[in-house]
């Protein structure tokens, strides 16, 4: 029998984004408490949690940070849900990945892109897509048995895929996991009649979620002109119907009985493309070319198999000391691949240093990609899980300067780029305050966006870092001075006095003095501006067109009178 979700409680893994987020949101909108279990929340998921997490909220949403391959964390997920909500009625072990390069049949353990240990005895893809749903189902049944109210019906809903009916040379492990999910769900069918616990699944087609859109290596197989996306909300509608209805129609969301109707019972698997159909355990015709099921350019991935399947699988991992190639050779989806990983799981970041300058038209060369983040360990852990490797063989550097300022440099899975994580607080950027950022699409094919600082925020942080920290290293201070002087030299907006209105008050005199012609690259200028900054913060200084007389050579012409050796006459020249 079906039941209403009103007044019930649910656990949904992977609900930080995509289908699972849409399902969690729909449950909440229908009066069901939800524990959202994921590594992190994307911004849209954080909005949902904020809306439903106040003490007076009914229903309520609770976020529990969970790595689904860690069985202890899965147990803690149930413990927290029980403590917050009491009895749990609905469990959806929905977290999953689609054969990423870092856990991939054609990129075996021991090859450069794989993060599956060569002698580790496991694949992360199997742990996430199959072992985690199996273990979560076990834990759910244990909870239902030990803490459930007699005669109160329960539901476990899995996420399979049309890949569970098809074969795909490019993604054989993913296909195997989805065939296995179908088998698991059907094996649980008799629980419906015996114990009132219904186990079902949806088998979505091609869904427009970060699982696809944040991965350029996958989205390239979809032809927007020939293929049609299914939305996460459409899948969520069918998931809710599986719980609340004893039959589901072919038309998503329709409850009038139009079109074919499919009876719901334990073991039911419903394919969700732009329409719905029931997947039979025997002699099923398969998903065919129904709208929402097709990817027209799958051959693009299959062609790569011949490239990687022989010589690549035998290659040795690159040494960390091997030089990385020139990052300018790669497109933004490779250059900023670390940003896409962080974006996908909702970890705030902002692109910094040379890449930020280049964004505003400064013709600078880019080397390592520097990102400002709130917590280095959290961001590094997310990248490591996505196949990045910490560079432990080279000293910590910013440009040419060896530094002790906290950072974590990581090499990309394809060994093409290096990302250096820096604390935003060290570099005086207020990332914790959720400042406005400039969001730029990574390319024409992906809705994912990159986070750059707004120009006033970039300039303020560079000035503040130069004036008061995080270092007194002379080489690095010169580098910071070069950064903001490049901005003043190449960005037209900074040549306007009125730009100061967008800057922090304590930096406005700095702006006026640069426009007045002071040499802003010297230590006398730095000392002068530090004094003015402190006085402005204490309310002991009035802004002026220029803070010093123009005959002050230390500020306006610090190089006057400096004599350099004459290489010809061994004398000196001015």
Image (tube, helix red, strand yellow):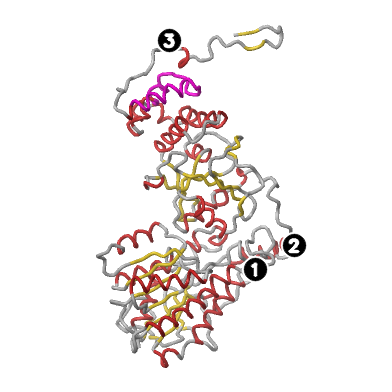
Identify the residue shown where x is 37% and y is 48%.
434
3 vs 1, front mark? 3
Q: Tags 3 and 1 in contact by the CB under 8 Å rule? A: no
Q: Earlier in the sequence, mark 2 or mark 3?
A: 2
Residue 314: x percent and y percent?
Answer: 75, 62
Instruction: Reply yes or no: does residue 522 show up in magenta.
Output: yes
Does residue 536 lie above or below 384 as drawn? above
In the rendered structure, which segment of residues is drawn in magenta?
510-535
**Residue designated by label 3:** 551
- 109 horizontally vs 281: left or right: right
What separation in Å lies between label 1 and label 2 (alpha carbons)? 13 Å
Instruction: Judge the density around disc 3: few (<14), some (14-19), many (≥20) Cα neighbours within 10 Å.
Output: few
Instruction: Reply yes or no: does residue 291 show up in magenta.
Output: no
**Residue designated by label 2:** 314
2 vs 3, front mark? 3
Does residue 345 lie above or below 517 as drawn? below
**Residue designated by label 1:** 105
Tag 3 secondary structure: loop
If the image is split into quadrants, where does the N terminus sit?
A: bottom left
């Amino acid at each position: 029998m079906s039941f209403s979700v009103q007044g019930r409680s649910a656990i949904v893994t992977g609900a930080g984004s995509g289908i699972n987020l849409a399902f969690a949101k729909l449950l909440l909108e229908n009066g069901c408490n939800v524990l959202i279990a994921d590594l992190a929340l994307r911004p849209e998921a954080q909005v949902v949690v904020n809306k439903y997490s106040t003490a007076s909220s009914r229903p309520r949403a609770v976020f529990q940070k969970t790595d689904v391959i860690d069985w202890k964390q899965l147990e803690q997920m149930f413990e927290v849900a029980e403590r917050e909500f009491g009895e749990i009625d609905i469990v959806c072990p929905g977290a999953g990945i689609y054969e990423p390069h870092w856990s991939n049949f054609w990129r075996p353990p021991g090859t450069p892109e794989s993060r599956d240990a060569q002698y580790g005895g496991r694949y992360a893809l199997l742990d996430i897509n199959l072992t985690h749903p199996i273990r979560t189902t076990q834990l759910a049944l244990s909870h239902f048995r030990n803490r459930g109210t007699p005669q109160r019906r329960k539901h476990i809903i899995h996420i399979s895929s049309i890949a569970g009916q098809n074969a795909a040379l490019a993604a054989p492990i993913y296909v195997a996991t989805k065939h296995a999910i179908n088998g698991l769900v059907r094996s649980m069918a008799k629980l419906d009649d015996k114990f009132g616990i219904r186990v079902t699944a949806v088998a979505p087609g091609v869904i427009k979620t970060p699982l696809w859109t944040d991965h350029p290596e996958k989205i390239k197989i979809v032809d927007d002109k020939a293929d049609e996306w299914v939305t996460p909300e459409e899948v969520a509608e069918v998931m809710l119907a599986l719980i609340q209805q004893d039959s589901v129609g072919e038309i998503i969301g329709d409850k009038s009985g139009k079109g074919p109707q499919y009876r719901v019972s334990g073991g039911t698997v419903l394919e969700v493309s732009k329409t719905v159909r029931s997947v039979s355990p025997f002699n099923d015709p398969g998903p065919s070319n129904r709208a929402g099921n097709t990817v027209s350019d799958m051959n693009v991935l299959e062609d790569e198999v011949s490239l990687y399947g022989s010589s690549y699988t035998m290659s040795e991992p690159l040494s960390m000391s091997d030089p990385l190639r020139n990052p300018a050779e790669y497109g933004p989806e490779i250059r900023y691949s670390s940003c896409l990983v962080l974006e996908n799981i909702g970890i705030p970041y902002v692109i910094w240093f040379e890449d930020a300058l280049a964004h505003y038209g400064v013709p600078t060369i880019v080397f390592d990609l520097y990102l400002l983040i709130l917590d280095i360990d959290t961001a590094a852990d997310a990248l490591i899980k996505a196949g990045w490797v910490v560079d432990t063989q080279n000293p910590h550097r910013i440009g040419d300067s060896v530094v002790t300022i906290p950072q974590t440099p990581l090499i990309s899975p394809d060994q093409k780029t290096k990302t250096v994580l820096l604390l935003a607080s060290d570099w005086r950027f207020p990332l914790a305050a959720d400042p406005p950022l400039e969001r730029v699409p990574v390319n024409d094919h992906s809705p994912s966006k990159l986070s750059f600082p707004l120009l006033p925020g970039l300039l303020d942080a560079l000035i503040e870092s130069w004036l008061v920290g995080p270092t007194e290293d002379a080489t690095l201070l010169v580098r910071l001075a070069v950064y903001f002087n490049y901005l003043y030299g190449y960005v037209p907006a900074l040549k306007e006095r009125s730009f100061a209105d967008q800057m922090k008050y304590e930096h406005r005199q700095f702006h006026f003095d640069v426009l007045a012609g002071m040499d802003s690259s010297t230590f006398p200028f730095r000392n002068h501006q530090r004094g003015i900054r402190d006085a402005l913060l204490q309310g002991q200084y009035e802004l002026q067109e220029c803070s010093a007389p123009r005959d002050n050579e230390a500020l306006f012409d610090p190089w006057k009178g400096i004599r350099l050796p004459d290489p010809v006459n061994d004398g000196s020249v001015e």
